[in-house]
Image: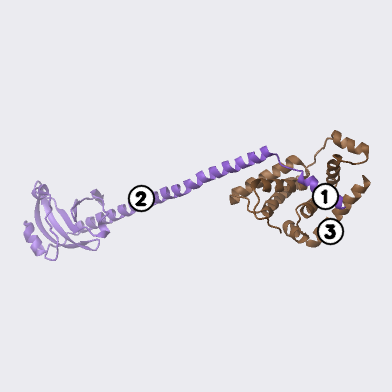
Chain colours: A purple, B brown
Amino acid sequence: MKNLEQEFKNYYRSKRIASEKITAMQASVHEMQRTRYNVSYLIPIAAVILLTIGIGLWLHISTDSITHQVVAEIGHNHRQHGALVVESDQYAVVQAALSELDFPIRPRRDEFVQDFVLVGGKYCTIQDSRAAQLKLTPRKNGTVHTLYVLPISDDIKSVKPGVYETNGIQVELWTDQTLLYGLAHGQ
Amino acid sequence: MPAPPSLSAEELLQSGFRYAYALTHHHHDAEDLVQTAWLKLHQRYKKVKTKALFFTTIRNLYIDQYRRRQRVRFITLTSEHEGLSTSGTVTGGDTKVAIDQMLSKLRDIEREALFLHIVEGYSANEIADMTGRPRGTVLSLIHRSRKKLAALDAAD
Protein backbone atom coordinates (compact mmCIF):
# COMPACT_ATOMS: atom_id res chain seq x y z
CA MET A 1 0.00 0.00 0.00
CA LYS A 2 2.91 2.34 0.78
CA ASN A 3 4.17 1.91 -2.76
CA LEU A 4 0.71 2.45 -4.14
CA GLU A 5 0.37 5.69 -2.18
CA GLN A 6 3.72 6.83 -3.51
CA GLU A 7 2.55 6.02 -7.03
CA PHE A 8 -0.64 7.91 -6.31
CA LYS A 9 1.40 10.95 -5.21
CA ASN A 10 3.67 10.68 -8.24
CA TYR A 11 0.66 10.39 -10.50
CA TYR A 12 -0.91 13.62 -9.28
CA ARG A 13 2.40 15.47 -9.06
CA SER A 14 2.97 14.67 -12.70
CA LYS A 15 -0.29 16.39 -13.61
CA ARG A 16 0.54 19.90 -14.68
CA ILE A 17 -1.34 22.66 -16.37
CA ALA A 18 0.35 23.79 -19.58
CA SER A 19 2.54 26.87 -19.23
CA GLU A 20 0.76 28.52 -22.19
CA LYS A 21 -2.49 28.09 -20.30
CA ILE A 22 -0.97 29.75 -17.23
CA THR A 23 0.31 32.63 -19.34
CA ALA A 24 -3.13 33.05 -20.90
CA MET A 25 -4.81 33.02 -17.48
CA GLN A 26 -2.41 35.61 -16.09
CA ALA A 27 -3.01 37.76 -19.16
CA SER A 28 -6.77 37.49 -18.63
CA VAL A 29 -6.34 38.56 -15.01
CA HIS A 30 -4.22 41.55 -16.02
CA GLU A 31 -6.73 42.54 -18.66
CA MET A 32 -9.60 42.19 -16.18
CA GLN A 33 -7.77 44.27 -13.56
CA ARG A 34 -6.81 46.90 -16.11
CA THR A 35 -10.45 47.22 -17.16
CA ARG A 36 -11.54 47.33 -13.56
CA TYR A 37 -8.98 50.02 -12.70
CA ASN A 38 -10.21 52.03 -15.67
CA VAL A 39 -13.75 51.71 -14.40
CA SER A 40 -12.72 52.41 -10.81
CA TYR A 41 -11.04 55.64 -11.90
CA LEU A 42 -14.28 56.66 -13.58
CA ILE A 43 -16.39 56.18 -10.48
CA PRO A 44 -14.99 59.15 -8.48
CA ILE A 45 -15.01 61.29 -11.61
CA ALA A 46 -18.64 60.42 -12.25
CA ALA A 47 -19.42 61.11 -8.58
CA VAL A 48 -17.80 64.55 -8.79
CA ILE A 49 -19.70 65.35 -11.99
CA LEU A 50 -23.00 64.23 -10.45
CA LEU A 51 -22.26 66.20 -7.29
CA THR A 52 -21.43 69.31 -9.31
CA ILE A 53 -24.63 68.94 -11.32
CA GLY A 54 -26.58 68.40 -8.10
CA ILE A 55 -25.09 71.45 -6.41
CA GLY A 56 -25.60 73.52 -9.56
CA LEU A 57 -29.20 72.41 -9.78
CA TRP A 58 -29.76 73.14 -6.11
CA LEU A 59 -28.19 76.59 -6.44
CA HIS A 60 -30.25 77.24 -9.54
CA ILE A 61 -33.44 76.21 -7.79
CA SER A 62 -32.63 78.17 -4.62
CA THR A 63 -31.61 81.25 -6.64
CA ASP A 64 -34.83 81.04 -8.60
CA SER A 65 -36.67 80.54 -5.39
CA ILE A 66 -35.32 83.68 -3.63
CA THR A 67 -35.78 85.81 -6.76
CA HIS A 68 -39.34 84.57 -7.03
CA GLN A 69 -39.96 85.38 -3.35
CA VAL A 70 -38.58 88.94 -3.67
CA VAL A 71 -40.57 89.59 -6.85
CA ALA A 72 -43.76 88.24 -5.24
CA GLU A 73 -43.24 90.38 -2.12
CA ILE A 74 -42.60 93.53 -4.17
CA GLY A 75 -45.69 92.82 -6.28
CA HIS A 76 -47.77 92.28 -3.17
CA ASN A 77 -46.50 95.50 -1.52
CA HIS A 78 -47.09 97.46 -4.74
CA ARG A 79 -50.76 96.51 -4.68
CA GLN A 80 -51.26 97.71 -1.08
CA HIS A 81 -51.15 101.46 -1.89
CA GLY A 82 -50.47 102.27 1.76
CA ALA A 83 -50.17 105.83 3.05
CA LEU A 84 -46.81 107.53 2.58
CA VAL A 85 -44.75 108.70 5.55
CA VAL A 86 -43.56 111.69 3.62
CA GLU A 87 -44.64 113.29 0.37
CA SER A 88 -42.00 115.18 -1.57
CA ASP A 89 -40.37 115.20 -4.98
CA GLN A 90 -36.99 115.69 -3.35
CA TYR A 91 -34.99 112.57 -2.53
CA ALA A 92 -33.14 114.45 0.20
CA VAL A 93 -36.40 115.29 1.96
CA VAL A 94 -37.68 111.74 1.79
CA GLN A 95 -34.26 110.43 2.88
CA ALA A 96 -34.35 112.75 5.91
CA ALA A 97 -37.88 111.67 6.79
CA LEU A 98 -36.91 108.00 6.60
CA SER A 99 -34.08 108.57 9.07
CA GLU A 100 -33.90 104.95 10.18
CA LEU A 101 -32.51 103.93 6.82
CA ASP A 102 -28.72 103.89 6.76
CA PHE A 103 -28.37 103.70 2.98
CA PRO A 104 -29.03 106.20 0.17
CA ILE A 105 -32.48 105.86 -1.36
CA ARG A 106 -31.75 107.90 -4.47
CA PRO A 107 -30.98 105.63 -7.40
CA ARG A 108 -27.52 106.18 -8.84
CA ARG A 109 -28.88 105.91 -12.38
CA ASP A 110 -29.35 109.55 -13.38
CA GLU A 111 -31.59 108.71 -16.34
CA PHE A 112 -33.91 106.95 -13.90
CA VAL A 113 -34.13 110.06 -11.72
CA GLN A 114 -34.76 112.15 -14.83
CA ASP A 115 -37.49 109.87 -16.15
CA PHE A 116 -39.45 109.61 -12.92
CA VAL A 117 -40.87 112.18 -10.55
CA LEU A 118 -40.67 111.26 -6.87
CA VAL A 119 -44.02 111.45 -5.05
CA GLY A 120 -43.02 110.33 -1.59
CA GLY A 121 -41.86 107.38 0.46
CA LYS A 122 -42.33 105.12 3.48
CA TYR A 123 -40.71 102.21 5.23
CA CYS A 124 -41.37 98.63 4.29
CA THR A 125 -39.71 95.25 4.62
CA ILE A 126 -38.60 92.90 1.92
CA GLN A 127 -37.50 89.44 3.06
CA ASP A 128 -37.32 90.75 6.63
CA SER A 129 -34.91 93.54 5.65
CA ARG A 130 -35.88 97.14 6.20
CA ALA A 131 -36.37 98.83 2.84
CA ALA A 132 -37.47 102.13 1.35
CA GLN A 133 -40.72 102.10 -0.63
CA LEU A 134 -40.81 105.11 -2.95
CA LYS A 135 -43.80 106.20 -4.97
CA LEU A 136 -42.88 107.54 -8.40
CA THR A 137 -44.61 108.62 -11.56
CA PRO A 138 -43.03 108.66 -14.97
CA ARG A 139 -42.72 112.12 -16.48
CA LYS A 140 -44.40 111.00 -19.69
CA ASN A 141 -47.55 109.62 -18.02
CA GLY A 142 -49.20 109.55 -14.65
CA THR A 143 -49.09 105.85 -13.86
CA VAL A 144 -47.97 104.83 -10.39
CA HIS A 145 -44.68 103.08 -9.98
CA THR A 146 -43.19 101.85 -6.76
CA LEU A 147 -39.46 101.62 -6.21
CA TYR A 148 -38.05 99.45 -3.45
CA VAL A 149 -34.53 100.02 -2.25
CA LEU A 150 -32.81 97.75 0.28
CA PRO A 151 -29.32 96.65 1.20
CA ILE A 152 -28.22 93.33 -0.27
CA SER A 153 -28.10 90.95 2.70
CA ASP A 154 -26.81 87.35 2.61
CA ASP A 155 -30.40 86.19 2.23
CA ILE A 156 -30.96 88.04 -1.02
CA LYS A 157 -27.47 88.14 -2.50
CA SER A 158 -28.36 85.45 -5.02
CA VAL A 159 -31.35 87.36 -6.41
CA LYS A 160 -31.05 87.48 -10.18
CA PRO A 161 -31.55 90.93 -11.78
CA GLY A 162 -34.10 90.99 -14.60
CA VAL A 163 -37.66 91.83 -15.51
CA TYR A 164 -40.34 89.60 -14.00
CA GLU A 165 -44.09 89.53 -13.82
CA THR A 166 -46.22 88.51 -10.87
CA ASN A 167 -50.01 88.57 -10.96
CA GLY A 168 -50.08 91.17 -13.71
CA ILE A 169 -47.50 93.42 -12.03
CA GLN A 170 -44.20 93.94 -13.80
CA VAL A 171 -41.18 93.98 -11.52
CA GLU A 172 -37.72 95.02 -12.67
CA LEU A 173 -34.86 94.05 -10.37
CA TRP A 174 -31.34 95.46 -10.53
CA THR A 175 -28.44 95.84 -8.18
CA ASP A 176 -26.02 98.70 -7.75
CA GLN A 177 -23.06 98.21 -5.46
CA THR A 178 -24.55 97.11 -2.12
CA LEU A 179 -28.19 97.88 -2.88
CA LEU A 180 -31.02 96.00 -4.55
CA TYR A 181 -33.63 97.96 -6.45
CA GLY A 182 -37.05 96.72 -7.45
CA LEU A 183 -39.36 98.79 -9.61
CA ALA A 184 -42.98 97.66 -9.79
CA HIS A 185 -45.81 98.94 -11.93
CA GLY A 186 -49.10 97.79 -13.33
CA GLN A 187 -52.64 97.10 -12.12
CA MET B 1 -5.00 23.37 7.60
CA PRO B 2 -1.36 23.77 6.56
CA ALA B 3 -0.77 27.28 5.35
CA PRO B 4 2.35 27.52 3.25
CA PRO B 5 4.05 30.90 3.65
CA SER B 6 3.22 32.11 0.19
CA LEU B 7 2.99 30.23 -3.06
CA SER B 8 3.77 31.76 -6.39
CA ALA B 9 0.93 32.16 -8.85
CA GLU B 10 2.24 29.24 -10.87
CA GLU B 11 2.55 26.98 -7.81
CA LEU B 12 -1.00 27.87 -6.79
CA LEU B 13 -2.29 27.20 -10.27
CA GLN B 14 -0.51 23.84 -10.51
CA SER B 15 -1.76 22.87 -7.09
CA GLY B 16 -5.30 23.95 -7.97
CA PHE B 17 -5.08 22.08 -11.24
CA ARG B 18 -4.11 18.83 -9.47
CA TYR B 19 -7.05 19.24 -7.11
CA ALA B 20 -9.39 19.96 -10.02
CA TYR B 21 -8.00 16.92 -11.78
CA ALA B 22 -8.67 14.80 -8.70
CA LEU B 23 -12.28 15.93 -8.84
CA THR B 24 -12.92 15.69 -12.57
CA HIS B 25 -10.36 13.09 -13.60
CA HIS B 26 -10.26 14.92 -16.91
CA HIS B 27 -7.50 17.24 -18.10
CA HIS B 28 -9.54 19.85 -20.00
CA ASP B 29 -12.32 19.98 -17.43
CA ALA B 30 -9.71 20.51 -14.73
CA GLU B 31 -8.11 23.31 -16.76
CA ASP B 32 -11.50 24.97 -17.24
CA LEU B 33 -12.29 24.70 -13.55
CA VAL B 34 -8.96 26.20 -12.53
CA GLN B 35 -9.26 29.04 -15.00
CA THR B 36 -12.80 29.90 -13.93
CA ALA B 37 -11.91 29.77 -10.24
CA TRP B 38 -8.74 31.81 -10.78
CA LEU B 39 -10.57 34.58 -12.63
CA LYS B 40 -13.48 34.54 -10.21
CA LEU B 41 -11.20 35.02 -7.20
CA HIS B 42 -9.26 37.80 -8.92
CA GLN B 43 -12.51 39.47 -9.82
CA ARG B 44 -13.72 39.33 -6.24
CA TYR B 45 -10.55 39.80 -4.20
CA LYS B 46 -8.03 41.06 -6.79
CA LYS B 47 -5.88 38.02 -5.95
CA VAL B 48 -6.04 34.43 -4.78
CA LYS B 49 -5.61 34.87 -1.05
CA THR B 50 -4.99 31.29 0.07
CA LYS B 51 -4.70 27.83 -1.39
CA ALA B 52 -7.61 26.69 0.78
CA LEU B 53 -9.84 29.40 -0.67
CA PHE B 54 -8.70 28.46 -4.18
CA PHE B 55 -9.54 24.79 -3.51
CA THR B 56 -12.94 25.70 -2.05
CA THR B 57 -13.76 27.84 -5.08
CA ILE B 58 -12.72 25.05 -7.44
CA ARG B 59 -14.81 22.60 -5.46
CA ASN B 60 -17.90 24.83 -5.48
CA LEU B 61 -17.57 25.40 -9.21
CA TYR B 62 -17.18 21.68 -9.77
CA ILE B 63 -20.35 20.99 -7.80
CA ASP B 64 -22.22 23.74 -9.67
CA GLN B 65 -21.02 23.05 -13.16
CA TYR B 66 -20.07 19.42 -13.44
CA ARG B 67 -21.82 17.24 -10.96
CA ARG B 68 -25.21 18.85 -11.45
CA ARG B 69 -24.90 18.38 -15.16
CA GLN B 70 -24.35 14.67 -14.63
CA ARG B 71 -22.11 14.84 -17.64
CA VAL B 72 -21.52 11.61 -19.48
CA ARG B 73 -18.21 11.37 -21.25
CA PHE B 74 -17.22 8.74 -23.75
CA ILE B 75 -13.58 7.83 -23.37
CA THR B 76 -11.83 6.47 -26.41
CA LEU B 77 -9.52 3.63 -25.59
CA THR B 78 -6.00 4.53 -26.53
CA SER B 79 -3.30 2.06 -27.37
CA GLU B 80 -1.96 2.55 -23.85
CA HIS B 81 -5.30 1.52 -22.38
CA GLU B 82 -5.52 -1.42 -24.72
CA GLY B 83 -1.98 -2.47 -23.80
CA LEU B 84 -2.91 -2.40 -20.15
CA SER B 85 -5.96 -4.54 -20.65
CA THR B 86 -4.19 -7.15 -22.72
CA SER B 87 -0.90 -7.41 -20.92
CA GLY B 88 -2.49 -8.08 -17.53
CA THR B 89 0.63 -6.86 -15.68
CA VAL B 90 1.75 -3.36 -14.97
CA THR B 91 5.34 -2.33 -15.06
CA GLY B 92 7.50 0.79 -15.48
CA GLY B 93 5.84 3.49 -17.62
CA ASP B 94 2.56 1.66 -17.52
CA THR B 95 2.23 2.43 -13.81
CA LYS B 96 0.80 5.85 -14.52
CA VAL B 97 -1.81 4.39 -16.82
CA ALA B 98 -2.63 1.76 -14.26
CA ILE B 99 -3.11 4.37 -11.54
CA ASP B 100 -5.21 6.37 -13.96
CA GLN B 101 -7.40 3.34 -14.59
CA MET B 102 -7.76 2.63 -10.91
CA LEU B 103 -8.63 6.22 -10.06
CA SER B 104 -11.25 6.32 -12.78
CA LYS B 105 -13.02 3.55 -10.87
CA LEU B 106 -13.22 5.66 -7.72
CA ARG B 107 -16.00 8.14 -7.10
CA ASP B 108 -15.06 11.83 -7.28
CA ILE B 109 -15.51 12.28 -3.52
CA GLU B 110 -13.20 9.32 -2.91
CA ARG B 111 -10.52 10.68 -5.23
CA GLU B 112 -10.88 14.07 -3.61
CA ALA B 113 -10.48 12.70 -0.09
CA LEU B 114 -7.46 10.61 -1.08
CA PHE B 115 -5.86 13.49 -2.95
CA LEU B 116 -6.29 15.97 -0.12
CA HIS B 117 -4.99 13.45 2.41
CA ILE B 118 -2.17 11.72 0.57
CA VAL B 119 -0.92 14.34 -1.89
CA GLU B 120 -1.72 17.60 -0.08
CA GLY B 121 -1.18 16.17 3.40
CA TYR B 122 -4.35 17.53 4.97
CA SER B 123 -5.65 15.81 8.10
CA ALA B 124 -9.15 14.36 8.31
CA ASN B 125 -10.23 17.36 10.39
CA GLU B 126 -8.93 19.79 7.81
CA ILE B 127 -10.58 17.92 4.96
CA ALA B 128 -13.81 17.89 6.95
CA ASP B 129 -13.56 21.67 7.31
CA MET B 130 -12.79 22.16 3.63
CA THR B 131 -15.49 19.90 2.28
CA GLY B 132 -18.16 20.43 4.91
CA ARG B 133 -18.38 16.72 5.62
CA PRO B 134 -18.29 15.17 9.09
CA ARG B 135 -14.83 14.00 10.17
CA GLY B 136 -16.14 10.43 10.46
CA THR B 137 -17.34 10.50 6.87
CA VAL B 138 -13.97 11.79 5.70
CA LEU B 139 -12.12 9.05 7.60
CA SER B 140 -14.47 6.47 6.18
CA LEU B 141 -14.00 7.85 2.65
CA ILE B 142 -10.21 7.70 2.97
CA HIS B 143 -10.31 4.20 4.40
CA ARG B 144 -12.73 2.89 1.77
CA SER B 145 -10.79 4.49 -1.07
CA ARG B 146 -7.54 3.01 0.13
CA LYS B 147 -9.16 -0.42 0.31
CA LYS B 148 -10.62 0.00 -3.16
CA LEU B 149 -7.27 1.03 -4.59
CA ALA B 150 -5.53 -1.90 -2.90
CA ALA B 151 -8.16 -4.27 -4.25
CA LEU B 152 -7.83 -2.85 -7.76
CA ASP B 153 -4.05 -3.08 -7.48
CA ALA B 154 -4.26 -6.68 -6.35
CA ALA B 155 -6.65 -7.52 -9.16
CA ASP B 156 -4.17 -6.15 -11.69
Q: Identity of the amino acid at label 1?
A: Gln
- The disc at residue A56 is 2
What SS does tag 1 mark? helix
Report the residue that reaches farthest toward the top.
B79
Where in the figure is residue A167, as x and y percent of width and height?
A: 26, 52
Q: Identity of the amino acid at label 3?
A: Ser
Where in the figure is residue B112, as x and y percent of width and height?
A: 78, 51
Disc 3 crowd, CA 10 A, few/some/many (<14, 14-19, 20+): some
Identify which residue is drawn at 86% across, 33% down: B79
Q: Looking at the image, which is closer to me, B123 or A50?
A: B123
Q: Which residue is mark 3?
A: B140
CA separation, marks 3 and 2?
A: 70 Å
Disc 1 crowd, CA 10 A, few/some/many (<14, 14-19, 20+): few
Q: In which chain is the residue bearing label 3?
A: B
Q: Which residue is mark 1?
A: A6
To the question of a shared chain for discs 3 and 1, the answer is no
Q: In which chain is the residue bearing label 1?
A: A
Quadrant of the image occupied by residue A180: bottom left
To the question of a shared chain for discs 3 and 2, the answer is no
Q: In which chain is the residue bearing label 2?
A: A
Quadrant of the image containing the C terminus of chain B: top right
CA separation, marks 3 and 1?
A: 21 Å
Disc 2 crowd, CA 10 A, few/some/many (<14, 14-19, 20+): few
Instruction: Please identify, in this view, whether the residue under mark 3 or under mark 2 is nearer the observer.
Output: 3
Q: Looking at the image, which is closer to me, B89 or B30?
A: B89
Q: Identity of the amino acid at label 2?
A: Gly
Quadrant of the image containing the N terminus of chain B: bottom right
Where in the figure is residue B32, as x and y percent of width and height?
A: 70, 42
Instruction: Please identify, in this view, whether the residue under mark 2 or under mark 1 is nearer the observer.
Output: 1
Is A46 situated left or right of B7 in this image? left
What SS does tag 3 mark? helix
